Image (spheres, rainbow, N blue to C red):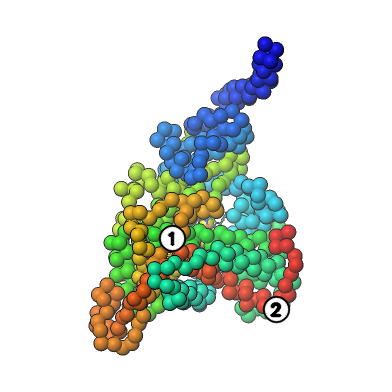
Amino acid sequence: MEWEWSYLCFSSIILLPVFILFFSQKKTTKCSYKLPPGPPGLPFFGNMFELGTEPYKRMAALKQKYGPVLWLKLGTSTNIMVVQTAQAAAELFKNHDTSFADRFIPDVNKTHNYYQGSLAIGRYGSFWRFQRRICTVEMFVHKKISDTVPVRRKCVDNMVKWIEKAANSAKKGSGIENRGSLDFFNAMKGIMEWSGTRGRAVKKGAEKGKDFLDVLLEFEGTGKDEPAKLSEHEIKVLIVEMFLAGSETTSSSVEWALTELLRHPQAMAEVKTEISKVIGLNKKFEESDIENLPYMQSVIKESLRLHPPLPFLIPRETIQDTKFMGYDIPKGTRVLVNTWAIGRDPECWDDPMSFKPERFLGSKIDVKGQHYELIPFGAGRRMCVGLPLGHRMMHFALGSLLHEFDWELPNGVSPKSINMDESMGATARKRDSLKVCGQVMLMLAPGPLEPPSILEPEGSKYELLKASKSFGFHLQRALEKYNIINSAFTIKLQNHTKSVKPTTQAPLD
Ligand code: HEM
């Protein structure tokens, strides 16, 4: 009996505050705000346990019940608003972009003061505006991107050579060991070291070969709407961020696009025919070819529709209390735009779950933030600043892979059995890295044989020989090995830092 009483007392002490909190929360919420609808959640924990490992899918499923704007709570104090339809996204970006233009800073990014100097998670304000301007003008305008064409050419050539070499050394039917991530992280370590040491070695006045890093180091501003100088920390963070923001997004998109093509042999045949007609066999794929390849552009759009690397964009935060679609959204609310759900919404797309690149042929829809049904790069003030480079690199890398090789699935894997699961890390990338088999086409010039029709311009004098053995490897290995995406940076920084002494300083302190 005594035991039962103490048990009851103990339970009441524990449970009473929970009930008080639960009911008081509901009451305040009802009285003060009209919040968007959402699942009720648990006391203290809110909806924390309902989201699973692929929260964008779970939230997409909740659209049926709760409509275009969803409200969630994490713990007792974190409010989350999820925008689930193209119309709601249009309303947000067209009419409330400034109110939702702040970013939320995850705790992990507070260490080493990473957020101070970050463009992607920097607070909306004059320093962010200055960073956007300097990145756009010094890196992402058409001319600057075109100036670095040879650098990307070299990296793609290296990637193709690596694949050919891998093909030659592979035993028939064997895969190639996937040490890609190791190479990638070694490269990242190097980059951090370079950006850490470079500040001490700059030679002032050396205008020739001035790159983005020089621009940052030599920057002298008014000190009013822009800083007077940039600190070493701010420069390091910005440089590292460009690598991080641009690498995985782009390489993961290329992997998804090739995966979809392997699942759809008709689309694969179509895109290869287009490339061989436009470029021919005795020429390399060039960036300037992209505009003449509407089917390949449609393949990339269709792949980004189904597999946006950032399914929630980058979370935003409300700067002030905001009235949005009839709801009262408090200051400090985290805002997620579920671009994954929007890309699969039957109200926007016919047969939304099918991969059909031809839906974009003759259509005006593009990914530049004006068509809210397709916003893999976001929209509004905080949309992807690297879009011009990322867009070009995706086409260049995929086009070169398709032009140089014939791709197949390994023995025992059929188009329908490819595992399409995603894993949510920095991006929603393919969980099982794509294992592909390629066939190298060796060109022997000139020869008597007519090449196979799908590959060749009619009347070609070239003889084609397909390597008899196929080779297999993980695509990411090739993409990451040459960090082809941000190659413009890599090579320039490499050249630049040859004379710099090694440092023992920690990269991001
Ligand atoms: C397939 C390629 C890429 C995709 C799909 C992508 C996607 C995105 C998305 C969805 C956002 C957030 C937009 C928003 O909140 O509305 C973003 C922001 C950003 N991206 Fe990209 N990105 C790509 C490539 C790149 C590249 C190549 C770079 C730079 C080298 C880059 C740098 C950035 C930066 C710095 C931001 C933050 C912008 C800001 O907050 O003002 N991205 N990107």
Q: Residues within 10 Å of mark 1 (few under 14, many from 20)?
A: many
- Residue 240 pos. (x, y %): 63, 62
Give the answer, above or below, for where 373 lies relative to 404.
above
How many numbered dots are placed on residues in this image? Answer: 2
- Residue 16 pos. (x, y %): 65, 20
Q: Where does the N terminus fall, quadrant-wise?
A: top right
Q: Where does the C terminus fall, quadrant-wise?
A: bottom right
Residue sitting at 33 percent across and 57 percent down?
Answer: 415
Circle 1 is placed at which residue position?
434
Q: CA distance from mark 2 to mark 1?
A: 39 Å
Of tags 2 and 1, which is closer to the observer?
Answer: 1
The numbered mark at residue 472 is none
Tell me if the residue at label 1 has its CB under 8 Å from ligand 1: no
Label whose residue precedes the other's in the sequence (2 or 1): 1
460 displayed left or right of 228: left
Circle 2 is placed at which residue position?
499
Give the answer, above or below, for where 170 lies relative to 117.
below
Residue sitting nearer the eye, 160 or 372? 160
The amino acid type found where label 2 is placed reads Ser
Residue sitting at 63 percent across and 47 percent down?
Answer: 106
The amino acid type found where label 1 is placed reads Leu
Q: Secondary structure at mark 1?
A: loop
Q: Residues within 10 Å of mark 2 (few under 14, many from 20)?
A: few
Image quadrant where residue 321 sits: top right
260 displayed left or right of 182: left
Image quadrant where residue 472 sits: bottom left
